[in-house]
Amino acid sequence: MLQTDNEKRDGTMNSIKSKIIIFTEISYIFILSGLIIFTSGISCAKNFSFDGKIRTRFEDLNGLNTKAYGNSSINAKGKIEGKSNDDVMLSRIIAGFTYSQNKKITYRLHAYDGYAWGWSLDRDDFIKNRGTRDEYVMDPDEDYLELFDASIQIKDFLTNGLSLVLGRQRIYYGDHRIFGPGNWGNSIGWIWDAVHFTYKKKDDFFSAWYGRTKFKDPDEFSPFFTDHIYQGVGIYSHFKTSDNGAAEPFFAWKNSLYHDVTPEENSFQYGMRLYEKSFHGINYDFTLAERRGNKGNKSINAYAYVAKIGYIFENIPMKPNFVIGRVFASGDSNPNDKTINTYTKIFGSTIGEHYGSLNIMSWSNLVDNQVDLYFEPAHKFHVKIAYHNFSLDEAKDTWAFYKYKNKPGNNYTHLGDEIDFQLKYNYLKNLQFHFIYAYFKAGDFVKYNVEDNNASTFFMECTYKFRKIYL
């Protein structure tokens, strides 16, 4: 289709506008860096550091990609999207400055840059609400020159034990399942522009914040005051119950800021996590979460839970920890009525530690019966072998990660079985190597509704942390 003169002119103006915004924000970073360094006192420069993290990862995908399952790469809308055999090299650099003016005040300013090479997908494959006023991008692997954090932390704010963090920041607690940064992908999942209070007394704390989360568009630089998808309130507490255990109540409110065309979400979540890392060898981890609220003209009534229990054989070589458990998230038996029974996470992470290393499951309409074995074959080596049996909670609902449905006449729920092998090697305190192999055997739902093939991935990752202190 030929563009009109007005469309060409608008495209040119948008391009110029984008470049001006990027230039302005880069200038802003350097100016703010200078202000932090020079207005806080050169005599305190020993507390100033250049620090960050470099992470490189190679992924070999077979039989699937991020947007489609199957050798034919046909997505839930029936269109070919990407390839099923990508060999992807991912790189992410986080770098910036940390400055402690004194024991109470700390400034942080970091940028990050995420690239993917050999990937059959790109930014345009991750556009949400395409062609509407609610359009935005959530690219999981590419985000060029983005503001990672820009914050001031004040300890003993107004009273002893109370701290304040103001500005761009990551917010994560517990096992990252309820509130997590979303660090598994190459871009950062939840980054907040927030005001964040924490009151801590000995080993217990209470945190509360209000903020907004940004989208992930590699072509956009997101300053503090634009490009937000949601606003929300979070509360997370930690009350110690033993030397290695705690109770962690939580609450979250979430409101979508893009709802000119799509239904507005106004929901909340509450619940609690209880865990024990080791009590005479016994360990457990339980989480219960309830979702309520509204999305458009529909009410939300959903729930999810995690139930795991294990035993650490501390007196035998390699200290194996054997864990069995179930991860559950409710589905919807009637998606066309006025109630949404499908549970979806609010601000939690989707790291592969939770839902399989192949990264094709999410905590929604899911039954995950799992067995995990952890052990340490040698000093600095950590191994995890896991088995997952994945099913849908409700056959009439979707496979949440890909949005595939049962075809007319089908009523299958078994998604498949996955075996994971993970090896972490902490070569140095600041240098870690991570290897993963995961194999997925397709179940009836996948075979008869998507494509009859199994899938696997091989993964190698190196993470290097650096910190240069200027004396």
Image: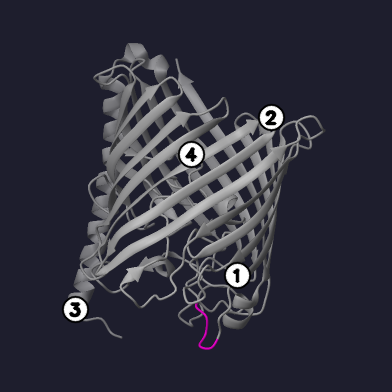
93 displayed left or right of 263: right
For badge 2, the amino acid type reads His
Q: Residue furthest left?
A: 6
| Residue that label 3 marks | 5
| Residue that label 2 marks | 280
User: Looking at the picture, does residue 237 appear above or below residue 352?
Assistant: above
Mark 2 or mark 3: whose residue is earlier in sequence: 3
Mark 3 or mark 4: whose residue is earlier in sequence: 3
Mark 1 or mark 4: whose residue is earlier in sequence: 1
Q: CA distance from mark 3 to mark 4?
A: 54 Å
Q: Which mark is residue 174?
A: 4
User: Looking at the picture, does residue 264 appear above or below residue 209?
Assistant: below
**Of circles 2 and 4, which is in front?**
2
**Of circles 3 and 1, which is in front?**
1
For badge 3, the amino acid type reads Asp
Q: What secondary structure is the stretch in magenta mostly built from?
A: loop
Mark 1 or mark 2: whose residue is earlier in sequence: 1
Query: Mark 4 Cα within 10 Å, few/some/many (few <14, many 20+)?
Result: some
- In percent of width and height, residue 161 lies at 34, 20
Which residues lie in the magenta part?
Answer: 405-409
Kindly state the secondary structure of the residue where label 2 is placed: loop
In magenta stretch: residue 406:
yes
Kindly state the secondary structure of the residue where label 1 is placed: loop
Q: CA distance from mark 1 to mark 4?
A: 31 Å
